[in-house]
Image: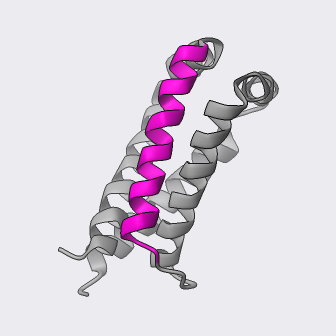
Amino acid sequence: MDVSSFLAKLIGIYFILIAILWLFRSRQISDAIKEIVKSKGLLAISGEFSLIFGLVILLDHPVWEWNWRGLLTLLGCFFIVRGVLRLAFPLQVQRIFSHIQKETWWPLFLVLLVIGAYLAYSGFAYSG
C-alpha cells in the first residue's frame, strides 16, 4: 500500500471519528481536554506524541504538492509545531486553551469533518 493512501485513510478516518465523537459527546470531550491542558505532565505527553506523529509523517512523506498528498505533509508540519509548542511553552498553551474553550467548538468540528472526509475519500479512491 502506498504511504500517501495509508496516511490519508488513517488520518481521514481518525478525524471523522473524532468529529463524530465531538458531535455526540462534546461535553465529555471538552472536560477531558480541560483536564489534559491543566496537567503539565499530560500536556507534555500529548506534545511528545504529536511531535513523534508529525515527524513520522514529515520524514516518510515529504510531498509538497497542491493536493491531498500535500495536505498530509502540511498536517505533519502542524503536528510538529503543536508538539513543540506544548513541550516548550506549556503556560502559553494553557492560556490559549482557556480562551478557546470559551468559544464554540463547531468550527473545529466542521474543519475536522471536512478534512477527514476529503482525506478518507482521497485515500480510498487513490489507485497509485
| Image quarter in which the N terminus is found | bottom left
Query: Can residue 26 be seen here?
Result: no
- Residue 8 relative to residue 34: left or right: left
Residue 47: x and y in percent read 54, 34
42 within the magenta span = yes
| Residue at position x 63%, y 49% in the image | 81
Viewer-proximal residue, 56 or 123? 56
Residue 106: x and y in percent read 66, 40
| Residue at position x 52%, y 76% in the image | 70
| Residue at position x 62%, y 16% in the image | 34
| Image quarter in which the C terminus is found | bottom left
Part of the protein shown in magenta: 40-62
Total labels drawn: 0
38 within the magenta span = no
Q: Residue furthest front?
A: 88
Residue 86: x and y in percent read 63, 33
Query: Can residue 12 be seen here?
Result: yes
| Residue at position x 43%, y 33% in the image | 21
Q: Quadrant of residue 5?
A: bottom left
The answer to whether 105 is drawn above or below residue 124 in the figure is above
- Residue 92 relative to residue 34: left or right: right
Viewer-proximal residue, 12 or 48? 48
The answer to whether 6 is drawn above or below residue 52 in the figure is below
Q: Main secondary structure of the magenta part?
A: helix
